[in-house]
Image: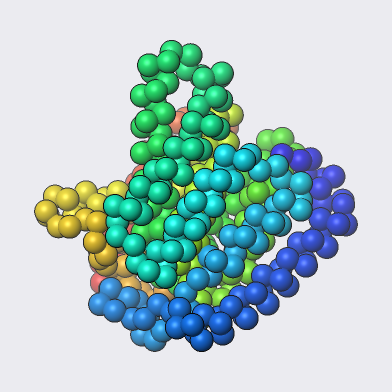
Amino acid sequence: MQDFYSFFNNSDALLKAFAFVIITALSLVISKKIFFRWEFVDKPNFRSNHKKPIALGGGIIIIPIIIIFSFLNNYIWDLSILISILILFFISMWDDFKNIKPIPRLFFHFFAVTIYVIFYLYPLIEKDFIDNKNMLLVFSTFLIFGIVWFINAFNFMDGINGITSVQVISICLSLLTLGYYFNNEINILAFSVLIIILVFCYFNWTPASIFLGDAGSIPLGFIMFLLLIDYALNGMWVISTILPLYYLMDTSITLIKRVYRRQRFWEAHKEHFYQQAIKNGFSHSSVSLKLLIVNIGLFSLSFYAYVYKNYIIIFIIASVWCSLFMYIFSKNK
């Protein structure tokens, strides 16, 4: 964290931001042509929401740029976190090119997350929260499974133009606003992600000319978890829980429904509520903008919950708020 005013009073920070906006935009423009030349594209299939090939691999561009931009703005990357992100990035990039089977892919997800939990989170939790070794081991195990679920939920939800960009922008803006309000601080990583994803959103908005791919959505999901867990470890767990609530509810309810119907829940499908909205006549931009409205509501509720300590009541309201939009998405327009 850095002081908010001192960061923006530094002209170098704004110049870096402007430079990386240009770099990101040019990189995406050039990479689109290269990806098409390599035939590295997402071709339409039975579950696609697009009708012509779209360049795949936006994540190959933006994830390294996020890491470099945040580093140049004096964000200190813990080695275990950086290793975990790189493992997720490279296995996801390989998956984009070769379509790895679920078991090997999940193995590397668990491997990367385990490194992060053991070498980064475990010492923090042991120091400040749980000193019983057995309880800490059990909690860490649940945490590993939870993080793997979170990053895959992020990936599952990246199915229409602009939706993940809206989600990432919403979370980053929310955390930056809360950081300014509570402590006059700025989270450099959240700021870095926000700047880069704003540029990507322009290219990914309807009609999209490039997709994130797994190399983008999986590491981005992990980075979002990093940002949210920082607030949870500082006592703001309600904020960390409510801000990503729509993504988690949509994915979890869809999975439960598929398990109940004895469907192969690990296979690709079009049953998420946001996907039902497209089938029911909503446009990609309409669904993404509605998600923005959802997230504005979740930000307001998380802020109110933390300030007034009405955790349970506000969490129930937040769940109802998300359920309302899932209901809207599931009905014909």
Taking depth in this image into account, of 268 and 261 the one nearest to the observer is: 268
In the picture, the quarter occupied by the C terminus is bottom left
- Residue at image position (56%, 85%) is 33
Taking depth in this image into account, of 174 and 88 the one nearest to the observer is: 88
Q: Is residue 45 left or right of residue 263?
A: right
Residue 270 picture location, percent across and down: 27, 67
Q: Is residue 194 visible?
A: no
Residue 313 picture location, percent across and down: 40, 33
Establish if 280 lies above or below 73.
below
Establish if 43 lies above or below 133.
below
- Residue at image position (59%, 67%) is 61
Taking depth in this image into account, of 225 and 324 the one nearest to the observer is: 225
In the picture, the quarter occupied by the N terminus is top right
Taking depth in this image into account, of 3 and 321 the one nearest to the observer is: 3
Q: Which of the 4 image quarters holds residue 329? A: bottom left
Q: Is residue 261 visible?
A: yes
Residue 271 picture location, percent across and down: 25, 63
